[in-house]
Image: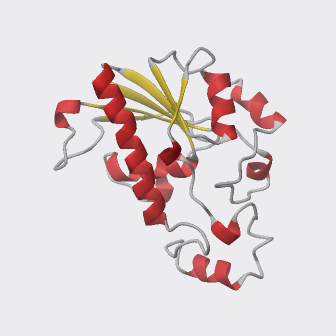
C-alpha cells in the first residue's frame, strides 16, 4: 500500500487578494508562512514538489528534513491573460465574462485549458507513482497547487466529485491510499481518501 499526502502550498500575496496565480512565481507572504505553523505532517520517505517558489518554500517549512524532488508537470495551470489578476481587475474584460458564462469550461485565453492542465498534472502524478513503485516507497508527500490537487482527485478519488468540490485551503489537502496491484490502465482509483483540515 502507498500513502500519499497531497498538500496545497501556503498563502502568497496574490492568494490574499484572490488573484489567479498560476505561472506567476511569487513566494509565500509573511502571513502565509505564519499560518503554516499550525499544520503538522509526518516525516515521509519521499517529497515531491512543484518547481514554483511557493511550493518549495512550503515544503521546506512542513517537511524540513525532506529532500525535495521537483516534478515540473505538477505545476499550476497557466491562466493566460487572467494571470495575476482578480475578478475585480477583470470585470471589464470580455474574455473573462465569456469564461464565467461558460462555468469555467473555456480555455484560459493565452493560457491552458482545464483539460490540458489536467493531462499534464496526471502525467506528473504518473512520474511520482513510478518513482514510488520502483523505489519501494510506502509513504510520500506532494506539495503542489490547489488546481493540481483538484485535477488528481477528480480523476482518481472515490466517490466521484466534480473538480471544484475538491478545493482545499492553503496548507491543507488529502491523505490518500492506493494499492499498486489494483492500479492499472483499466482501473485506477484511490482505496482510501481522508481530508486534512481543508479550510
Which residue is at a point 64% across and 33% down the rendered structure image? 56
Answer with the quarter of the image where residue 7 lies. top right
Q: Is residue 143 above or below residue 150?
A: above
Viewport quadrant of the C terminus:
top right
Q: Residue 54: x percent and y percent?
A: 68, 39
Instruction: Please state which of residues 26 and 134 is positioned toward the viewer in this rendering.
Output: 134
Q: Is residue 12 left or right of residue 195?
A: right
Q: Is residue 101 left or right of residue 133?
A: right
Which residue is at a point 54% across and 52% down the rendered structure image? 147
Q: Residue 164: x percent and y percent?
A: 50, 58
Answer with the quarter of the image where residue 1 lies. top left
Q: Residue 43: x percent and y percent?
A: 51, 15
Q: Is residue 78 above or below residue 175?
A: below
Q: Is residue 194 left or right of residue 36?
A: left
The outermost residue toward the right is: 30
Q: Is residue 23 left or right of residue 137?
A: right
Which residue is at a point 38% across and 48% down the rendered structure image? 123
Q: Residue 187: x percent and y percent?
A: 19, 47
Amino acid at each position: 500500500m502507498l500513502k500519499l499526502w497531497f498538500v496545497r502550498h501556503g498563502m502568497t500575496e496574490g492568494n490574499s487578494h484572490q488573484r489567479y496565480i498560476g505561472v506567476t512565481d511569487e513566494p509565500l507572504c509573511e502571513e502565509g508562512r505564519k499560518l503554516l505553523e499550525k499544520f503538522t505532517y509526518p516525516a515521509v520517505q519521499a517529497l515531491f514538489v512543484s518547481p514554483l517558489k511557493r511550493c518549495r518554500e512550503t515544503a521546506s517549512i512542513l517537511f524540513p528534513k525532506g529532500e525535495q524532488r521537483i516534478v515540473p508537470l505538477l505545476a499550476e495551470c497557466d491562466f493566460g491573460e487572467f494571470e495575476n489578476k482578480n475578478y475585480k481587475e477583470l470585470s471589464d474584460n470580455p474574455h473573462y465574462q465569456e469564461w464565467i458564462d461558460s462555468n469555467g469550461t473555456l480555455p484560459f485565453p493565452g493560457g491552458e485549458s482545464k483539460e490540458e492542465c489536467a493531462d499534464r498534472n496526471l502525467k506528473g502524478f504518473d512520474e511520482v507513482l513510478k518513482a514510488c513503485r520502483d523505489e519501494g516507497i510506502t509513504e510520500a508527500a506532494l506539495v503542489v497547487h490547489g488546481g493540481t490537487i483538484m485535477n488528481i482527485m477528480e480523476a482518481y478519488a472515490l466517490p466521484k466529485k466534480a473538480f471544484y468540490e475538491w478545493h482545499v485551503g492553503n496548507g491543507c489537502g488529502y491523505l490518500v491510499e492506493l494499492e499498486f496491484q489494483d492500479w492499472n490502465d483499466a482501473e485506477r482509483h484511490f482505496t482510501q481518501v481522508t481530508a486534512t483540515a481543508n479550510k
